[in-house]
Image (tube, coloured by chain):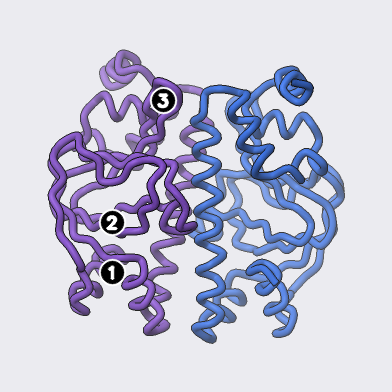
Chain colours: A blue, B purple
Amino acid sequence: MNPIQQLEQLISTHHLWEDEKVFARNSFLVTKGTINTQVFFITHGTCRVFIQDGDEEKTSRFGYKNSFIVALDSYISSKPTFFNMQAIKQCHVKIISKASLEGLLQQSLTHILLWQQILQALIYQQLEREVDILTTSPQERYNRVFTRSPHLFQEIPHKYIASYLRMTPETLSRLKKS
Amino acid sequence: MNPIQQLEQLISTHHLWEDEKVFARNSFLVTKGTINTQVFFITHGTCRVFIQDGDEEKTSRFGYKNSFIVALDSYISSKPTFFNMQAIKQCHVKIISKASLEGLLQQSLTHILLWQQILQALIYQQLEREVDILTTSPQERYNRVFTRSPHLFQEIPHKYIASYLRMTPETLSRLKKS
């Protein structure tokens, strides 16, 4: 089991899931400007996280089935989030509060080391993402993401991938064909 | 004491600093393509982390006196780093290996919770940074960073701040005057 599966199991074993919700396609799990420290585990569906930049929506990550998704800035700081989280397909989620999760993590060194592994993997993903964003060449950005996350191209609508890759849908089509 | 100072103290108390080094201005603490899992604590000077994007150097963060700086991707993955780390001013650093640091952290729940605090703060910084990079308006990018890190404008040469803000030095001069 990978660390994500282990954490999900741990929460289930301790009966700490507090709620289950279904979000219709295009509805919002979290809205910019609200405080939301909940931890969502997606049992079905996909969602995306984006920032509003003037008139533009800039997609910054995706949440897949069998993964956790969180308004991380709000989770960490307990301040309003800068991000929007929206269901791309109908999303079924299980929810645990920050307080319950922290209680569970602090019960043992094994738990907290599991959390450390998850945080470090997240930092690594963010570094990859930073390099993606700073890479000028659209071809290179496409190659990096395609190599790293081929499943993205199966599961996510084209227009959101283009937004994530900071290119127009037309450029993305051209690169996919080449 | 903040978590950074606490960690520095903890390493000192346990006599775990393994080396001290001085890096001349413009020399490299870490070079892209090498595996480097060392943890540096800067006792004097400043440095920057950048990626090479074609002919361009893109500055992604700064290391200040009394802070830790690490080739994080390499630290986490034990693979070659994608980043360069260069002294902006002469840098004095103390060094602890990943193995020693991990040994120390795993000694107690208090230590690992301190590390968790540091990792979460780092994730928060990375999220702030992602929003910076994705923000189209140079004025807004400037305002965000100036509000968050006013010290940056005291300590870091203009050209590197411009690179960090993804704008030309001319645009930065104009925004500073306005």
Q: Gap in Å between the C-alphas at discs 2 and 1?
A: 10 Å
Residue on which the image places disc 1 = B7
Residue on which the image places disc 3 = B166
Image coords of residue B115 (percent x, y): 39, 69
**Which quadrant holds residue A44?**
bottom right
Q: Gap in Å between the C-alphas at discs 3 and 2?
A: 24 Å
**Kind of residue at badge 2:** Phe
A50 vs A111, nearest the viewer? A111
Q: Residue at x 76, y 45 (%)?
A: A151
| Badge 2 and badge 1 both on one subunit | yes
Classify mark 1: helix, strand or loop. Answer: helix
Tell me which label, 1 or 3, sits earlier in the chain: 1
- Letter of the chain that mark 2 sits on in the rendering: B
Residue on which the image places disc 2 = B68
**Kind of residue at badge 1:** Leu
Graded by Cα atoms within 10 Å as few (under 14), some (14 to 19) or many (20 or more), the crowding at tag 3 reads: many
